[in-house]
Image (cartoon, helix red, strand yellow):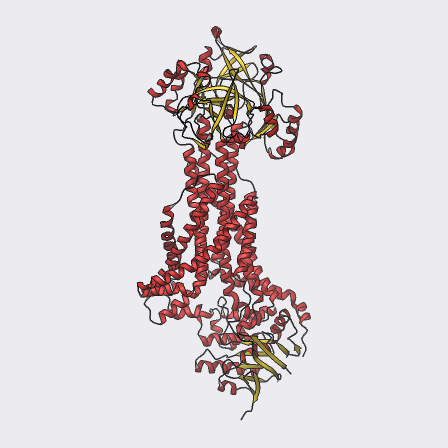
Amino acid sequence: MMIETRKLKQEVASGEGSLVILKGIDMAIYAGESVAIVGVSGSGKSTLLGMLAGLDRPSSGEVFLAGTEITGLDEEQRALLRGEQVGFVFQNFQLLPSLTALENVMLPLEVKGAKEPQVRAAQWLDRVGLAGRATHYPLQLSGGEQQRVAVARAFASEAPILFADEPTGNLDRRTGEKVADLLFSLNRESGTTLVLVTHDPKLAARCDRQLEMEDGTLREVALA
Amino acid sequence: MTVSVKSETRQSGAGKAGAARSLALKLLWRDWRSGELNILIAALMVAVTTVTSIGLFSDRIRNSIQDEAGSLLAADAQIRSRSAIPISDELRQQAESAGLATADIVTFQAMAFGNDDALQLSAVKAVSPEYPLKGELVIADQPFGEGRSVQAGPPAGEAWIISRLFLSLGIGIGDTIGVGDANLTVTAALITEPDEAGSFFDFNPRVMINTADVEQTGAVQLGSRARYRLLLGGDVEPFKAQVEDTLRPDYRWADVRDANEGVTSALDRAESFLLLAGSLGVMLAGVALALASRRYASRQLSHVALLKTLGLTPNAIARLYAGNLVILGVITVFAGLALGWILHWAFLELASGLLPRELEPAGWRPIWIGLLTGMVCLMAFAFPPVWVLRQVPPAKVLRSELEGGTLSQRMVVAIGAVAVVGLVWFYSGDVLLTAALLGGGLIALFGVSLMAAVLIRVVRRYGSRLGTTWRLGLSNLQRHSRQNAFQIMVFSIALMLLFILTLLRSSLIGEWQQQLPEGAPNHFAFNIFEDELDGFQGILDANNVQREPLYPMIRGRLTDVNDEALVDRLDRLQPSGDDFRRELNLTWSDTLADDNAVVDGQWWEPGDAQRNLISVEQDFAEQLEIGLGDELTFTIGGQPVDVTVKSIRTVQWDSLAPNFYVIFSGPILEGAGAAYITSFYLDADQKPLLAELLRQHPTVSVIEVDAIIRQIQDIVGQVTVAVEFILGLVLVAGFIVLLASVQATLDVRLVESAILRTLGARAALVRGGLWIEFASLGALAGLLGALGAEVALAYFQTEMLNLSWTPHPLLWVTGPILGGVVIGVIGVVSTRRVIKVPPMVVLRSV
């Protein structure tokens, strides 16, 4: 099992008392699976993703990431674990504007202290079809190109788990499809576990399983 | 699958650290290239540059002034004996073993004999061969001849006498002069002694001889009124600390500060001003630094969150950013030190025409202070916002509204205040000044932010009737009212500091120049007897010489205060100042001199001339605890004279007009035995008049103080240049604060303007709106700055600099206008991008 949660709960203080965002979620995702988390805006999808990836801490419950219970780890240890186990693709790309495309892809490799980060990053940039754009800065790239750089960066770390938060949400339909194609094909080739948050049913449909968030609870969507 | 987090770090720890560092440097380099760090660097640089160049500059000026003032003592310090007992050899040996150079002076009165039975009581000054340790001794080959500088006094067997003594003794160069029982050869005319100032009121003409000849004169015996001085040269402070407390009660330590009141007070004020200016400069730069660092850190928030998702730990984040800041800081601080040095050097080069001569070199202290200032600024202002970046929640990548990793404004202010207080304390070593600055700062902070909020509201309500552009600009002002109130606070404090310094500078320099205006008297004449008055005045007036009134003068000794013998009173009060036992110069006058002011009681009223009333100088009165109505007894010409105190006066001692501790309401002893004194101004061309004057009135004594006045004017000149220079630097610091402050809110304004433009607003409307917003901000800040400056100036002028308070009505007009224009221009120039660049680019890049 790659990811597992037990009675995962998240409450936040709000104006009148507390607001329960996650109401005790139990779930399991297996190695190599691709899973879509769907649901309407504000249903808590992104919050759940944050918990699964160890970006945030739940109010209570347990999260196992690659076999390690992470809610008990401090931020220092969780960061190290993320560096080893997790890659990300975000809706708004999250590239560092002051680094070139190539340097952005090198980032996770450098953080891990990997060997020859430049060579490996260049290879990944090549695989997403942007070898010619290596020295360009994010602002000089189109939205689709920026997201392809982000995909290259996510895979470059060779982490076993990939989290994607609305990866096509900021892109037009055609570009979004291209990026999705890339994401799924690379995922297949690398055998990574993919957890994808989206409200696009077509994108969700390309995953092995779909989980729907609704009112703080999660249920498996039966696939036709 | 289980992950061992710890072992993973161990395995590749070194490689990771190296990679993280290279990543950090890459980020630093890119941030620097993109201009992201410009303000931060500039602010830090200005702090260091200001402090370093102020330090170097004032160190050099101070050293030069000390050196110059030292020449007024002919040494760095003197130990003076108040009684006729030679300075002990033990003390001399102590001084010498402390590495100081020493020389001796013995002064005494002796009769000088010339040709044809001519004789004149003269003031003999015997000097040892080492004299003078400092300053210039100038002699001439002929009386009134052209002077040349010499390194030592007369050799044994020779005497140098002042020019007019040649006339009254009827002798020439090479003739023999009798000094008491000794016969010496006159080999030169004495033109100036460096330590002349101390002998202002040695009325008798000077004869300078060698100490080896003193015994031979027979004039110095037990009970005679000889005075001894041990001159000390070198670093006298350690020696002072060593011996000061154990000095015999009849010895007095005199150093540069005592050498000349005028120089000392100018120097003290200048130091206070420079200190104040330097502290304010650093404060301004600190504010700029804090603003810039906050902005830098806030722009890093999302990057930090991303780096965390990529596996960078909080410690690694802290190391990355802190490391970058340290690298940046160290480079900047050293650049600032270098720039500070270059600036002070360049300025001295530029000002070399204004400065009298080569300045003494500075010590290392300014460099250390600059370094320390840089590091403290870096740690206190720049570091905190960056250090807390480690706390940015990684989930911020998913939800940008998540908070964390920023410092509260209150915290920023608290840390900054502690640093400023610490620095000011360190610079000044003055708890009172530090407390005043802290208290004033806090009041300004709260007062100004409150008033800013009120003003914004008022302007918004009444200004919006002026049209669309105005409505837009003013609604901007209102919309960010909290942020704007903060910004007005920063602006107004910056403007306030600039106003304070600019105005203080003017009143300081004005005051100095007023003290020693062109044409200030540079000669004193005394021993002018009643029958010579008309003739003497006639010569001066016929030659259009500017002169002070002639004052009658008579010597007298104070014996009793309210029936208490002075001796007992002195024992009881132990006054620190003058030797009150000596004879005083007394005068009478019906008019109050321009440079005197009655501070207690009343100046003479009609009929007072017939009553025995006196007016006493304030310091003298305080030392002896004399008040209005007190009964004093003087012994004048052997007779007791009882008088009552009618007023207490202040006297401007450095005006170079004749001045007196005690002024009587009418002629003392019917004017018997009084001789007159005056002072007058001769320029270089009029100098030959002096010989003429003395030829016709050989018994009149004249002291030439033009050399001393020149020295004082040189010093004032140097200090003025220093003040101007430092003001310039502080202005730069203030400008950077304004820039940093505008930059701090730039992103929000850029986005808003871009949105307005996408909605179809014309460039003119957007630009006009920004103009109005920034100019209003600046005008409000200028108004508050003027208010704050007026209050602070009243304090500084009266309490710190001992100047009189004057209001500055012009400030209330120029303050708001200046604030509006400067901040309007900075604001509009900084935001010009929003008009030039397509709105989409702005929206994407911010």
Most distant residue in the top direction: B116
User: How many numbered marks does the figure carry?
Assistant: 0
* Residue A51 in the image: above or below residue B144: below
Quadrant showing the N terminus of chain A: bottom right
Most distant residue in the bottom direction: A224
At a point 56% along the width and 40% down the height, the residue shown is B363
Residue B322: percent from left, percent from top: 57, 60
At a point 49% along the width and 58% down the height, the residue shown is B291
> Is residue B172 in view from this perspective?
yes
> Is residue A158 in view from this perspective?
no
Closer to us: A7 or B59 = A7
Closer to us: A126 or B577 = B577
Residue A81: percent from left, percent from top: 63, 73
Residue B74: percent from left, percent from top: 54, 27
Closer to us: B525 or B160 = B525
Closer to us: B674 or B560 = B560
* Residue B372 in the image: above or below residue B33: above
At a point 45% along the width and 45% down the height, the residue shown is B793
* Residue B786 in the image: above or below residue B553: below
Most distant residue in the left direction: B467
> Which of the 4 image quadrants contains residue B142?
top left
> Which of the 4 image quadrants contains residue B462?
bottom left
